Image: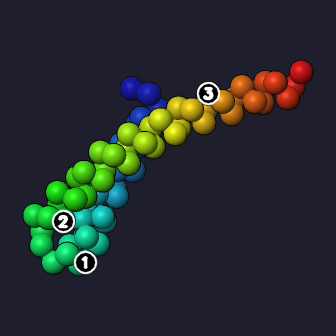
Amino acid sequence: MNEHLKKVILWRMISFPTATTITYLYLGELTKSITLTAILMVVMTTIHFFFEYFWNKYYNLYDKLNML
């Protein structure tokens, strides 16, 4: 498994209970809190993965061009 994907998944495993607790304190309903957190986790994990991918791809390219 890709190292970046592992890091993203591990972070989401840590952040899920935290976000669920915060949304529960705000909404006061456990089912809605879990649902909202699950949706956000899927969206944010996808965005984070692609951010890491493009960052590494273009940042490394930028470094190589500056070495010329």
Separation of residues labelled 3 and 1 (CA atoms):
39 Å
Residue 10 seen from this side: no
| Label 2 neighbour load within 10 Å: few <14, some 14-19, many 20+ | some
Q: Residue at x 33, y 46 (%)?
A: 43
Q: Mark 1 points at which residue?
A: 26
| Residues at circles 1 and 2 in contact by the CB criterion of under 8 Å | yes
Q: Mark 3 points at which residue?
A: 57
| Residues at circles 3 and 1 in contact by the CB criterion of under 8 Å | no
Q: Which residue is drawn at 30% across and 53% down?
A: 40
Residue 60 seen from this side: yes
| Label 1 neighbour load within 10 Å: few <14, some 14-19, many 20+ | few
Q: What element carries label 2?
A: helix
Rendered view: 2 above or below 34: above
Measured from the top left, where is residue 39 in percent x and y? 24, 51
Measured from the top left, where is residue 15 in percent x and y? 34, 58
Q: Give the amino acid type for the residue marked by disc 1 in the picture.
A: Tyr
Q: Is mark 3 on a helix, strand or loop?
A: helix
Upstream in the sequence, badge 2 or badge 3?
A: 2
Q: Is mark 1 on a helix, strand or loop?
A: helix
Q: Residue furthest top?
A: 68
Badge number at residue 33: 2
Measured from the top left, where is residue 3 in percent x and y? 47, 32
Q: Give the amino acid type for the residue marked by disc 2 in the picture.
A: Ser
